[in-house]
Each structure stands twice: as C-alpha cells, then as structure tokens.
Image: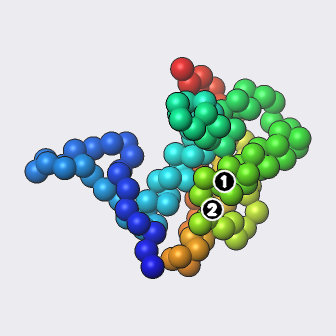
Amino acid sequence: MSGGTGMRFPFRIHPGGGTARVADLERIDTELRHLLASRTGDRVMLRDYGAGVDHRRQEPDTAALRTLLRHDIERSLRRYLPQVRLVSPLTLSSVGDVLTITFEYTVVPLGAARRLTLPLDRSKERR
C-alpha cells in the first residue's frame, strides 16, 4: 500500500508540461510542513485547517505556551493527517525569533520512521 501522490508545494509546472508531483513519504512530509505552517482560516472551505501555531507565534515563550502548541499540533495531526503517528514527543525550542518544531513520526501504510524539523520565524507577520 502506498501513501499516494499529490501536487508539489509550492506549485510548479514541468518544462515539458504538467504539474510537478510528489509521492509517498515526500508527499506526507510536504503536507506536514504545510499543515504546521498554514495560518488558521486561510482555507475557504476548511476554516480551521492549520495547527494553530500562527495565532500564538507572538506570545512569550513559556511552558504554558509550549503545552498549548503541543496540544493544538497533535489535534491538528489527528484531524487532517490521521495516517501520521507520532513516535517521539513533540519538542519546541525557541532561539531568538525562531520557533522550531521537531518530532519523529511514522506513516501508517508505509511504516517508515521520519523526523521533521520545521523552523518558524516568530517575527514575521503573515498577511
């Protein structure tokens, strides 16, 4: 069983025509990054899509904030990428204005363990 295919993000056109595609683990990795970096409310038909990181980026880095972010990210993964299973605790680290989310996961049909590290710049306001 495979993880399927999807369009590459950011969207690209091949020189010979057609859209660039990603498959299996690369597709899941792309979807994870997109889910975590998406601003809640940006998708018209899925107003709650996103992990909630965007509206908490400007808050001071505290233990309470990290707990809320972990909860929001885990809830979002269960809802939008149910084939992803966390195999390590979600860790959040902050250096200056960069919040880094790191965790290990497996994809249920594929079974391969992967590690995701996603730095998000807390100083950038998305419009």
Q: CA distance from mark 1 to mark 2?
A: 6 Å
For the point 53% across and 49% down, which residue is it? 33
User: Which circle marks residue 109 in the picture?
Assistant: none
What's under tag 1, amino acid-wise? Arg
User: Measured along the vertical axis of the image, is residue 81 above or below residue 46?
Assistant: below
In this figure, which residue is indicated by the disc labeled 2? 82
For the point 27% across and 52% down, which residue is it? 20
Q: Residues within 10 Å of mark 2 (few under 14, many from 20)?
A: few
What's under tag 2, amino acid-wise? Pro
Q: Residues within 10 Å of mark 1 (few under 14, many from 20)?
A: few
Q: Quadrant of the N terminus?
A: bottom left
State the colouring used for the structure image: rainbow
User: Measured along the vertical axis of the image, is residue 23 above or below residue 113?
Assistant: above
Q: Most extreme residue toward the front, as rendered?
A: 45
Is residue 35 toward the left or the right of residue 95 in the image? left
Is there a contact, CB below 8 Å, between mark 1 and mark 2?
yes
Quarter holding residue 38? top right
Q: Position of residue 17 (x, y in %)?
A: 14, 48
User: Which circle marks residue 79 in the picture?
Assistant: 1
For the point 79% across and 49% down, which residue is it? 71
